[in-house]
Image (cartoon, rainbow, N blue to C red):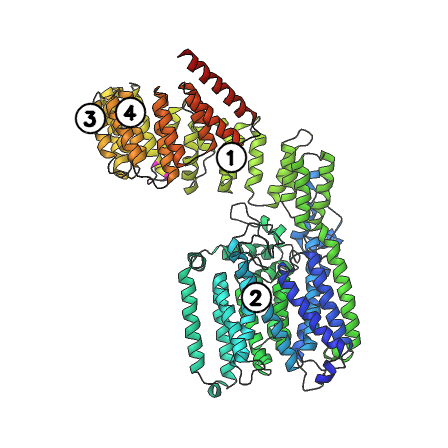
Amino acid sequence: MTHATEAIWPGRASRWLLAAGVSGAALAIGSVNTYVLCAATAVVGLSAALGWWSDRPTRPRPAATILVVLCAALTLYAGLQCIPIPVELLRHLAPYNADVWSRALSPLHAPGPRFAPVSLDPSATRIELLKGVFYLLTLLAALRIARSKDGVTFLSGTVVVTALLLAAAALLHPAFGLHKVFGIYTPQSPIHDRHIAPLLNANNLAGYLNVALCLSLAPTLSREPRLPRSVTGAAAVVLIATQVWVASRGGIIAMLLGVLLVTAIWWRTRTARRFGLTPILIAFVTLAAAVLLVVASSNGISGELLDPGTSKLNIARQALRIVHATPWFGCGRGAFESVFPAFRTTGGYYTYSYPENVLVQWLSEWGIPVGTFGLVVGLVALRPNAVLARSTTAGGAWAALIALGIQNLADLGTEIPGLVVAGVVCAAIVVGGTAGDLPRSRIHRWANSPQRVAWSACVMAIVGIVIGASAAPTALHDDEKRLANAALAGRASAAEMRGLARAAMLRHPAEPYIPFIVGLRASDSTDDNPLPWLEAALERAAIYGQAHLVLGRVFARNFPSQARLEFRLAIEQGMDLLPYVLADAMHLVGEYDDAMQIVPPGPDGAKVLQQVIPDIPASLPATRVRLDAQYSSLDPSARAPKIDAATNAVDDIEANTRAEWCDDGEFAGCVGLALTLTERVRTDEPDRCTGYVLLARIRMADSRVSDGLAELQEAADHVTDRVSCLEQLVTLSRRAGDESRAEAALDRLLGAGCGDKAECAENASWAARDEEAHGNLRKALALYRRAYDRAPSDNLLEQIAALASRAALHAESAADYEILMRRQPDVTRWREAVAREREAAIRGSASE
């Protein structure tokens, strides 16, 4: 096709529409929103229709035909997964899928549907069908454009410009402190401010940057670039710098691989000898230095890059269990999120939308036959021979696809349309062009009727948009949100909740959250039984700590032992639930064995005991002692049980208690035990005050008051928590009646160095509270004013005014209340307090 033919308005419109669709898909939060994806599909569908309508019959390369047929076949298969078939037939084809459907309505004690699709989340699969149509239309439109060299330049330029816009947004959002994308969209999930960008996931953004980097680096190395090397080289530098800023480990590895592949292809074309290696070496040394400088200058970047976590690989391994359960037909395209909980083996309150591995994703959702077929055929179409027949830019596109594929073995981004469509454009660049020979088979003659292709594009776009838009309101997250709002608002009746749940479970039969949220509502009401719902949630999720937590609350009413077991399971399956478990379980603890029933075995047991022991009532001292011993056995390095044991022993000798765990119950034996335990605390933390305070209390209980206070006074000079030590010295000196030592300690406390004004104010406030407790009101008032001078606050000023009134300093009190009245004119009690204090001041003056 000649350039003049391509320049007519339908061809030009097709190009710019495709550019708008590709760029818009990425910039619009990756088009993860179904309605945005519908709009993008309409744009690229119009691009494909206009481009092919104005075209003439062509001979596409075999690789292009393979990709078109593969994309169409996979999209069609996703549609077939949504078609209901008799459950009995499904039981023979996909036993696991049929079993899930047969128990879909088990909380309602009703049989499952008689007809059910292969997909265990038909709504999600229909949205995936829309994605397939979007990719197919993009491929068709891009293939028509990629037949000419200027078309290839246009396509690669579209991706590179989009990546530069993404890079600019990624850098500018945190620079200006923006918490919304473009100041409009607020991310639904918490995200670090440094990663606010149109592609919210740093790994997805890294993948797009790598695609553009390969496309910009290839023409930079070309012997006859269509754009100045300074332009493409500058784009490559910006993309590399942004890639380092993004700090994706998989992205960095894929970037290095992409650069190596582009360089290898360039060397293969034998252009290196003419261009010279010196400029390239200089450029790469400069870039390496820039990368190291950026990494070294940011703790956040280096920390993320050097994070050794491998949780994503663990998730992929767990997801292989889905492949084993649904080997032939898969669980349904897009159904991974709702199916995975049944196969998950790690705890925690997390939702995994993808297995973070493209191979596992395809095999689990499409099944082994179709998934393997798609991967093999795709690799055959994009084999190295396909790219070596084209330009250097096509080599960059091929390298981009390989880098993107490698990254998606650990950082899945192939479920983000805005990213995948960039890969589709690269595929079109690689396989585009015209075949040298006439097509031998009928399937290769599909481009002989361009108008038929155009009409097909229109039909596919319409069908895909209708199917996708109809599925959007019934997507998993929307159904979950509706149920949560109805359950937590408390306005829905049991019948209404059952109706909502029934419809949602027939759309997402494997999802455990749906029965769980209904069970949670039922546990707080009296109009429904929560047990069938919670049992269904646990059937659909191997690990579901929240369900065990709610079961514990239900059983706590009549079956405390069973409740404690459920609480322990909740902790085992999610340590983040520990605060909620303790809030509900501690009233069920009446002895040591009760407490141990909620403590899981293994390392987590020590963490739980650390939180449980402080909540044990003082009326159960023996239980606390035994739990401390258990805590020490699980974690010998823990300091809390050692301090507790020493503190308990000191409490006993202060109360003159002949404790049964002392040597024969004699006082001397109790003192010896307390000294032994206290010395252990001091040995573990010689620079902390705790052990010295316990030792001083032992000396005082053993009638050696002066020795104990002197040792504590000396220790206060070299411990790290000096302020706390001086406070303890004041308290013990007051208790012993040694006022001179107490006053000296207070003076040292007020003269102790403090890190900031707030800390100084707190020291003065503590001294003021001590003086106030001992009736020294005027001294306390002076100290409170000292604290106020360092860190003013209305609460402290109110306290000062009240204390001045108690000290009969009514004029000062009135002045303080006047300040509060001016600051808070709407608070009527300040005005009343001013009048009251003025009147008291007048009465005091008259009496004098």
User: Is 317 covered by the magenta stretch?
Assistant: no
What is the three-letter code of the residue carrying label 2?
A: Tyr
Q: Quadrant of residue 802?
A: top left
Residue 753 position, x and y percent, is 30, 39
Q: Amino acid at mark 1?
A: Val
Tag 3: amino acid = Asp
Residue ID at (57%, 60%): 360
Q: Which residue is mark 2?
A: 208
Residue 527 appearing in the image: yes
Q: Position of residue 3 (x, y in %)?
A: 70, 84
Q: Quadrant of the N terminus?
A: bottom right
What residue span does the magenta drawing correspond to? Answer: 634-639
Q: Earlier in the sequence, mark 4 or mark 3?
A: 3
Q: Amino acid at mark 4?
A: Leu
Any mark on residue 732, and which? 4
Query: Mark 1 or mark 2: which comes first in sequence?
Result: 2
Tell which residue pokes out farthest to the bottom in this image.
Answer: 274
The residue under label 3 is 707
Please tell me the numbered disc located at residue 581: 1
> Which mark is nearer the camera, 1 or 4?
4
